[in-house]
Amino acid sequence: MKGIIIIGGGLAGLIASIRLASEGFISTVIEKKKYPFHRVCGEYISNETVPFLKTFGLFPEKFDPPNVNQLQLTSVNGKEAILGLDLGGFGVSRFSFDQFLYEKAVGLGVSFLLEEEAIKVSFEGDNFSITTNKRTLTADLVMGCYGKRSKLDIVLNRSFVKKRSPYIGVKYHIRTDHPSNRISLHNFKDGYCGVSNIENGKTNLCYLSHRENIKKFGNLPDLERAVLYKNPYLKYLFNNSEFLFDRPETINEISFETKLPVENHILMLGDAAGMITPLCGNGMALAIHSAKIASELVIKHLKQVNFNRNLLETEYSTQWRSSFKNRLRAGRQIQRLFGSEWASNLAVNLARYSKPVASFLVAQTHGNPF
Ligand SMILES: Cc1cc2nc3c(=O)[nH]c(=O)nc-3n(C[C@H](O)[C@H](O)[C@H](O)COP(=O)(O)OP(=O)(O)OC[C@H]3O[C@@H](n4cnc5c(N)ncnc54)[C@H](O)[C@@H]3O)c2cc1C
């Protein structure tokens, strides 16, 4: 049995560990936090993931996730368009979904090192050495599932870490009167806010803003009142909802720079391989899909003598690029239509008066069901 270490137990890491365990290959997942926990995420999952999740008993049916088939788009100054979503999605909190997947993985025998952080990975001979804040481990294979940015990226000298990213993310759970079949994308100056329902009648409100906004206003409530409230839909939501967290979840340094799917022989999955802009609402689908591709190739590598490490890495890079590269690029381009008055008006007008063009743009960021 070869040793497999998965660094990061988010969606990509959990799904990869489960898929490997379902074929009898037990991995060790190193996760710096302890389940369950909240993360900054819009918590809308594209339906392209449903066939895979159902095949492996991973669809979170027990949370009765709301079905979403409609997009509401509003511009910075509050113009509105409504668009049907061909594929649609469902809503479930990461707090519940990740815990659900973690329990599935434990049930299949996956071993977890929780509240432990990988700080260094090196590859020598044909083996990896992984140093955490608690111990040093060795492995034959390492899957990097540690999300958008980690100290490991600096250790691995990945080129994107040299550029600072201007974006911050903020998430709340609220109770409000948001229609359960709708995802809303509300623009504001230098940012946008997604709103969609999750389990137990709750609503996720999650926004991406420019770091300069925070510098200028000093704190989130002042930024929200001065900038987000200019969009009347957001002002209504903030003033007519019950906010369920003591304080919001926040993250910074959100980078959409291109990355490589294999670095120093580590197979990178999910955001660690490349992050799609959140307005596309399918970063989680990409994480799940890349975990499916990588774990199936790892299974092939472990079962077939002639499918060596070199072929595994080449095949994963090829499949990753053909499945996701264009979607990430389309997401970056579409994001340019967000966060300014004129561009968001253009986006709303496109959605209102050129529905086929708008649907085509949405389709560019989405994949086929897998
Ligand atoms: C504002 C915002 C809104 C979004 N909205 C949506 C949405 O509505 N729909 C959607 O599909 N996607 C959305 N996304 C994207 C989505 O959240 C990510 O694409 C997805 O979570 C990626 O999964 P992952 O497994 O790659 O990483 P993550 O889910 O981030 O998991 C990475 C894990 O690695 C752990 N970790 C990190 N470093 C280490 C280390 N050194 N050692 C051990 N553990 C480590 C972390 O604690 C974490 O648990 C959004 C993103 C943002 C920023």
Image: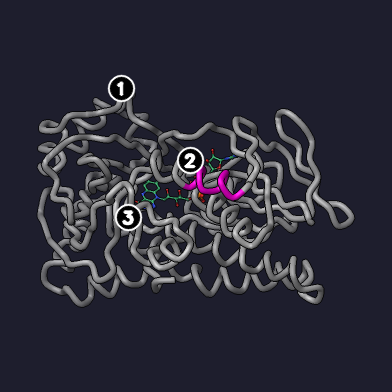
Q: Picture coordinates of residue 293 (x, y %)?
A: 57, 67
Q: Could you tell me which residue is drawn at 66 percent across and 53 percent down? A: 143
| Neighbour tally class for label 2: few under 14, some 14-19, many 20 plus, Cα within 10 Å | some
Magenta stretch: helix, strand or loop mostly: helix
Q: Which mark is residue 253?
A: 2
> Dot 1: what SS?
loop
| Neighbour tally class for label 3: few under 14, some 14-19, many 20 plus, Cα within 10 Å | many
* Residue 258 is one of the magenta-drawn residues: no
Please report whichever mark, 3 or 1, sits nearer to the chain's N-terminal start. Answer: 1
What span is colored magenta in the figure?
101-108
Q: Identify which amino acid the numbered label 1 is placed on.
A: Asp
Circle 1 or circle 2, nearest the eye: 1
Residue at mark 1: 246
Please report whichever mark, 1 or 2, sits nearer to the chain's N-terminal start. Answer: 1
Quadrant (top left, top right, bottom left, bottom right) of the N terminus:
bottom right
**Going by the image, does 10 lie left or right of 89?**
right
Q: Which mark is residue 279?
A: 3
* Residue 105 is one of the magenta-drawn residues: yes
Q: Could you tell me which residue is drawn at 23 percent across and 57 percent down? A: 67
Please report whichever mark, 3 or 2, sits nearer to the chain's N-terminal start. Answer: 2
For residue 290, what is the image quadrant? bottom right
